[in-house]
Every structure is written in structure tokens, then in C-alpha cells.
Image (spheres, rainbow, N blue to C red):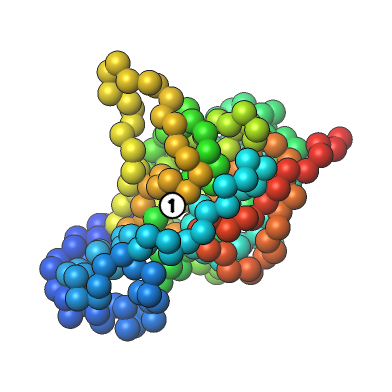
């Protein structure tokens, strides 16, 4: 039922209607100051949700030893990966290996960091790379489309591993593996990559991407989970509002 409703909402959002686009901007109080196009150029609600930023709207920290926010969002929480079972909310957990569809994940990422970010419908919906590296894995997982707001996270078991998601794994010499998981939700019309995958025949099988380059797009607000192989000292706290490109973490010495 939720998937059917979400598909209908996605279809309706693409209908050309400037009045609907302006109405959604007003209803959600979306700040369009950083948008690439003039307000009158947005002809549908979908155009508004998938808007691009104007040049120079975000400053991307270019340091090799920093992780930057891949999205504009609110921090749900951050933690160190100690086991396969991770806290979702009070009394609720989920599995890292199930989230990443990778049985080796607990061994690969133990000691690393995890950061969860919530994008509201009013936020900028494009997802960018937190590091410079190579895309070595991209997996789409079909699933449910449960909502991802606080009440749902606190009440639905294994929410992040049950929902539709797009898993993009990058490799860097400095950070090792860094995974960006785009988690779908109710009313999210689709998850889209901004690069060709799998790569065309004869092309380099590992797609090089720069920090701040676009990875994909949500067609409405949702959640991004960032997982790192290297230990991280997170520079953001629960509830903080972050902008794409700002520093959210630096390396931390690995401890037993």
C-alpha cells in the first residue's frame, strides 16, 4: 500500500504546474536562495525537490583528512562500529551486514564510524561524495518504504534494513572504504544515481569521483547513513543541522 501511494505521489509530483510548485515551496517554507534557477523556472513539485544548487552555494572542504557532509540534513546520531548489531533507537537495533548487504561488513568496519543524517522534505535532496575516491560498488536493494521520521524509527524494527536503499561504496587510500547508503521512505518517488552503473564495456570499472561531486538524488526527503572503515572523531552532535560540504569528521587513532 505504501509503495503504491509513494508511486502515485511521485507521478503527481512530475505534473507540470507552477502553482503547485510555488505552493509546495510556501507550505514547506523551502529556502530557495541557494537554488540554481529562478523561482519562476520551477514547473513542478518534482523540480523543486530535485533542485540543484547555484555555483558557490556550498564550500567543500578539500582536506584529505576530513569527511564532509554528503547532504543538507539533521544529524540523527553518530557512533563507533563495535559489532554487527547497531542501535536504531531506544530498544530497537539493526544489522550492519544487512544494511550494506555484505556479510563481511562487521569485520571490515569494526572500529570505524557511522553517521545517520535525516533529510526533511524542505532540504536540498541531492547526495554528494564525502571523500575523493573510486566508486567500487553500487547496489540497489528493493524493499519497503516505511517513513523514517523519529516516531517510525522508534517503533519499526530493523527499519533501515527493511526499506528500499541504494548502497554506494567508495575506496580511498586515506580512509579505506567509505559507504554512503541512501535509504528510501514513504513518498520518496525514487533513488537515482548521478553516474552510470555498471560502467560501460571497456570503461574503467572503478569510477573516480571527487569530494563534493554528486552521487545521487532523492525525489523527496529521506535518510543517509555514512559508514567508514577508518575510525572517526565526529565533529557533529545529535540534532545538529549540517550543510553539504562542511566537515563532519576527522580521523581518530584506532583503539582496541
Instruction: Tell me if residue 147 comes above or below residue 167 in the rendering.
Output: below
> Looking at the image, which is closer to me, 18 or 243?
243
Residue at 67% over, 51% down = 249
**Quick one: which residue is furthest to the front in this view?**
56
Name the residue located 51 percent from the left edge and 44 percent from the top edge.
Answer: 211
Quarter of the figure with the N terminus: bottom left
Image spot of residue 220 (x, y percent): 36, 62
Is 20 on the left or on the right of 208, as rendered? left
On the picture, is 127 further left or further right than 256?
left
- Visible residue check, residue 164: no
The residue pinned by badge 1 equals 127
Estimate the x, y position of residue 22 in percent, counting from the top left.
Answer: 24, 79
The single residue placed furthest to the left in the displayed view is: 16
Whether residue 256 is visible: yes
Q: Quadrant of residue 10?
A: bottom left
- Residue drawn at x 53%, y 63% is 243
Quadrant containing the C terminus in the rendered view: top right
Label tally: 1
Label 1 neighbour load within 10 Å: few <14, some 14-19, many 20+: many
In the rendered image, residue 218, in percent from the top left (x then y), is placed at 37, 55
Left or right: 68 with respect to 197? right
Q: Residue at x 43, y 68 (%)?
A: 123
Helix, strand or loop at mark 1: strand
Q: Position of residue 47 (x, y in %)?
A: 24, 64
Amino acid at each position: 500500500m505504501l509503495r503504491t501511494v509513494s508511486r502515485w505521489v511521485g507521478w503527481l509530483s512530475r505534473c507540470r504546474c507552477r502553482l503547485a510548485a510555488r505552493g509546495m515551496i510556501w507550505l514547506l517554507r523551502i529556502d530557495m536562495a541557494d537554488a540554481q534557477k529562478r523561482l519562476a523556472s520551477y514547473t513542478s513539485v518534482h523540480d523543486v525537490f530535485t533542485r540543484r544548487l547555484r555555483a558557490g552555494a556550498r564550500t567543500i572542504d578539500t582536506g584529505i583528512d576530513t569527511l564532509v557532509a554528503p547532504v543538507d540534513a539533521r544529524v540523527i546520531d553518530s557512533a563507533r562500529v563495535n559489532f554487527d548489531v547497531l542501535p536504531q533507537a531506544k530498544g530497537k537495533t539493526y544489522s550492519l551486514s544487512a544494511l550494506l548487504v555484505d556479510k563481511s561488513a562487521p569485520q571490515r568496519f569494526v572500529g570505524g564510524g557511522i553517521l545517520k543524517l535525516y533529510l526533511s522534505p524542505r532540504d536540498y535532496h541531492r547526495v554528494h561524495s564525502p571523500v575523493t575516491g573510486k566508486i567500487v560498488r553500487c547496489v540497489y536493494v528493493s524493499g519497503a518504504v516505511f517513513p523514517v521520521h523519529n516516531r517510525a524509527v522508534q517503533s519499526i524494527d530493523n527499519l533501515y534494513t527493511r526499506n528500499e536503499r541504494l548502497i554506494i561504496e567508495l575506496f580511498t587510500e586515506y580512509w579505506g572504504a567509505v559507504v554512503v547508503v541512501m535509504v528510501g521512505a514513504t513518498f520518496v518517488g525514487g533513488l537515482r544515481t548521478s553516474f552510470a552503473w555498471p560502467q560501460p564495456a571497456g570503461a574503467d570499472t572503478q569510477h573516480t569521483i571527487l569530494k563534493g561531486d554528486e552521487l545521487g538524488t532523492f525525489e523527496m526527503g529521506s535518510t543517509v547513513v555514512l559508514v567508514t572503515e577508518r575510525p572517526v572523531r565526529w565533529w557533529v552532535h545529535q540534532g545538529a543541522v549540517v550543510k553539504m560540504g562542511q566537515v563532519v569528521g576527522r580521523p581518530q587513532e584506532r583503539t582496541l
